[in-house]
Amino acid sequence: MGIMALIAMVTATESLKENIRVEFSSLGTDSFTIGPKRNSGFFKGKRPAPSTPITYREARQFSKIAPSDVLVSSSIFASATAIIGRNSNRTDPNIQILGVDENYLDVSNIPLSHGRGFSSSEINAGTPLIIIGSNIKDKLFEPWEDVVGSNLLLSGSRYTVIGVLESRGASFGMSQDNQCLITTTAVRRQFSDVNRSYTITCAVADTEFLEKSTDFATGAFRMIRGDMPGAPSSFDISKSNSLVETLLEATSGITIAAAVIGIITLFGAGIGLMNIMLVSVSERTREIGTRKSLGASARAIRTQFLVEVIIIGQIGGFVGITAGLGIGNIIASFFETPFVIPWEWIAIGMTLCMITSLASGYYPATKAAKLDPITALGRA
């Protein structure tokens, strides 16, 4: 039970960590994001004023002055409850609409299963084009139908499909295959970007120049936003690798808690196993006396009981690890995180089982080895 609790919690935690690595690996370790400043809490009894959103003009201006070795993409969230229609078919009102530019797919490292991305001329013209997720394709199209080139209705406006996103599963319980991409210009025309903030993502050619590019972006965007010298920046810059590290550090506390709980449970299991072996010694005094009278040494008796308790402990450990892997991955499946096998923790679990077995079985084995054969036969 102790090993099962330990492995189950560690497996679920490792699955969450793996999901974090997978989801943020698309951004790579050579990118950073400029977003609106997050204000929270209270200052002098007052909640701080909402941050000023990053506008379309500011995002485009930054793209123009960015160095040639920095690939810049801007995007804007439009809706999370949109409906996509085709002929008489309709999706559920849970489609996420994101406005992007021509560099978004490359910067975000999002692959397409069919079609192509947007061109700069289509972005500037606001051409009604759309890239759909795989769930939307499966919902509105038959397997034999051509998706690229067909027309869809988005909130009453007609869009032409130019691509289909490769299936990416779910991220933190939310499906990424229910997402549609349209141009930022189309978002401004149909959804309006008043009070909406743009997100700017920058990818550098080499990780070595990430710090230098981040510093340049900070200075350039402060100038664009009109931040006064000495005043704090009116925006936040986050690096993809630092965000991953922060999230992984947050989950490491869960792993430590799981280990502590598992070890405490193992301690209780060790006490129970020792009591079982003490009872076994008491019930097998005749066997011990007979073996000793036939010439068995104290070492042989002690070895016999130690081997028994080790076998019992390892069998219990194997069953606990198997059950823990199953329970942990079942828990992880509810959050739609990947299946994992924490080999390092399995090795630690088996080692703990061995240590617990030896610690709990040594005293009963020593007690059995010290039994006097005449006394043992007399008790029997």
Image (cartoon, grey):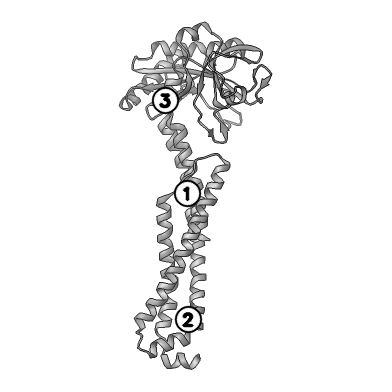
As measured in the structure, the alpha-carbon distance from the residue carrying label 2 to the one carrying label 3 is 66 Å
Question: Whole-percent x and y of residue 121?
Answer: 47, 7
Q: Nearer the viewer, residue 200 or 372?
A: 372
Question: Whole-percent x and y of residue 295?
Answer: 35, 88
Q: Is residue 52 at all visible to an observer of this figure?
A: no
Question: Whole-percent x and y of residue 110?
Answer: 46, 25
Please name the amino acid that badge 3 sits on.
Answer: Phe
Q: Nearer the viewer, residue 212 or 318?
A: 318
Q: Which residue is mark 3?
A: 32
Q: Is residue 150 above or below residue 16?
A: above
Residue 281 is labelled as 2
Q: Residue at x 51, y 83 (%)?
A: 283
Q: Residue at x 48, y 68 (%)?
A: 270
Give the SS element for disc 1.
Answer: helix
Q: Earlier in the sequence, mark 1 or mark 2?
A: 1
Left or right: where 92 falls relative to 229: right
Please name the amino acid that badge 1 sits on.
Answer: Thr
Density class for disc 3 (Cα within 10 Å; few <14, some 14-19, many ≥20) is many
Q: Earlier in the sequence, mark 3 or mark 1?
A: 3
Q: Residue at x 52, y 40 (%)?
A: 337
Q: Nearer the viewer, mark 1 or mark 2?
A: 2
Q: Is residue 25 above or below residue 267?
A: above
Give the SS element for disc 3.
Answer: strand
Residue 255 is labelled as 1
Q: Looking at the image, do the residues carrying marks 2 and 3 touch, with CB atoms under 8 Å apart?
A: no
Figure quadrant of residue 71: top left
Question: Whole-percent x and y of residue 308?
Answer: 43, 73
As measured in the structure, the alpha-carbon distance from the residue carrying label 1 to the one carrying label 2 is 38 Å
Q: Nearer the viewer, residue 180 or 50?
A: 180
Q: Is residue 299 above or below residue 118?
A: below
